[in-house]
Amino acid sequence: MTQIAARLTATTMIGRMASVVSSRLADWPPEVVTLVLVGLALLLAWVLQGVAIRAVPRRLRLHRHGLDRLVQQARRPLFFGSVILMLGLVMPAAPLSPGAARLVGQGLRAAVVVLIGWTAILGIDLLTTRQLARHRDDIQNDPTARRHATQWQVLRRACHIITVLVTTAAALMAFPAVRAYGVSLLASAGAAGLVVGLAARPVLSNLIAGIQIAITQPLRIEDAVVINGQWGWIEEITATYVVVRIWNWQRMVVPLAWLLEQPFQNWTRDSSELIGTVHWHVDYTVPVDVLRQKLQDIVHANPLWSGKVVVLQVTHATAQTMELRALVSARNSGEAWDLRCAVREQMIAFLQSEYPQALPKQRLEISGGAAEALRTAA
């Protein structure tokens, strides 16, 4: 009760202060008096914001990082709310005409709606940041963390769009002229409504696709994917599009609605681990068992190997060479690529130094008179 009484006393004092200022400047033009009162409201709002920020002990903010982030992000909404409050207390003393006073009241009501929407978006961001902070930064090897990050990021952006749409509609409804226009437009349901519906269809379809991805999760943050022939990782999922980080550091932006309608490959949907393949074409004289043991040595000495799969097989035989295929496992797509390259290079170096005759070669058989002529010439 004491706090409520103190607040009522403070508001009464501010109203009286505005009335005193308005009476002292009664000989001035009404526009100037109004500007002076607006400046007074801004000054009081700045003071109120400073008092509210300093009310949170600095020591407590330093020990609780989440509280400090909340205070930093709340500065602008707090100042905006303080301005609305002070204008609501000061403007009744301004020498305004009835029409202007009514318009100011409508604008303040719309500003309150905007403040509520702004605060809702701030709360959504803080909640999402807190949830994402529970997992480590390196989420490429953790499918649960990728699923968690995808759900919260997509739902956050979808909530942003819905909040902005609802806030904008509610703020416009504070003005009778706009509200009447909106009601008449919805009642007519004519060509204008059809045009608006067609214009909003891509946005709504992408928004619905984003919610669908958040729920079903055909892809997640840091998934290794192949989309439209391009291989890369899912870097960001917004409410309307997906950003794919291609292996050469380029970025490919794909609309969500298009993505759900087209087939794509997801290499790490169930697990981040991958099995990489390496192929060689060698001569038939190569000792496969020796190469198999060498592959074991190469892979066991490489920290990129996940320790699960290492296999060397003869997968194909042509008239000139036979094809060897090595299977090696890695913890994620990036390490699988690097491991494949390392295995390929070291195996080629081993063949060059130990079995150079086993490298691919072309055979040529000469028979009949041509062979006899070559022997005679030699």
Image (cartoon, grey):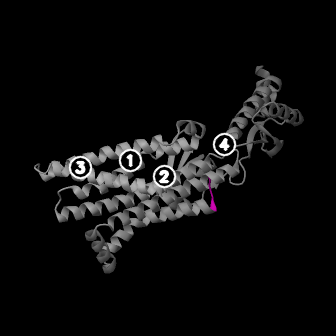
Residue 366 % position (x, y): 77, 33
| Mark 2 Cα shell of 10 Å, populated few (<14), some (14-19), many (≥20) | some
Q: Quadrant of residue 352?
A: top right
- Amino acid residing under circle 4: Arg
Task: Pick whichever of labels 4 and 1 is earlier in the sequence.
Answer: 1
Residue 122's mark?
2
In the rendering, at what x and y percent does residue 266 appear? 65, 53
Give the number of the disc on residue 13: none
Q: Residue at x 70, y 50 (%)?
A: 143
Q: CA distance from mark 1 to mark 2?
A: 14 Å
Q: Position of residue 86 (x, y in %)?
A: 32, 52
Crowd rating for badge 4 (residues with CA inside 10 Å; few <14, some 14–19, many 20+)? few
Q: Earlier in the sequence, mark 4 or mark 3?
A: 3
Is residue 285 in view from this perspective?
no
Label 1 with label 2: CB-CB less than 8 Å: no
* Residue designated by label 4: 136
For residue 79, the mark is 1
N-term mark: 3 or 2: 3
**Mark 3 or mark 2: which is in front?**
3
Which residue is at 38% across, 58% downward? 114
Helix, strand or loop under label 4: loop
Residues in magenta, as a range: 216-221
Q: Earlier in the sequence, mark 2 or mark 4?
A: 2
**Could you tell me which quadrant the C terminus lies in?**
top right
Decide if residue 284 is on the left or right side of residue 59: right
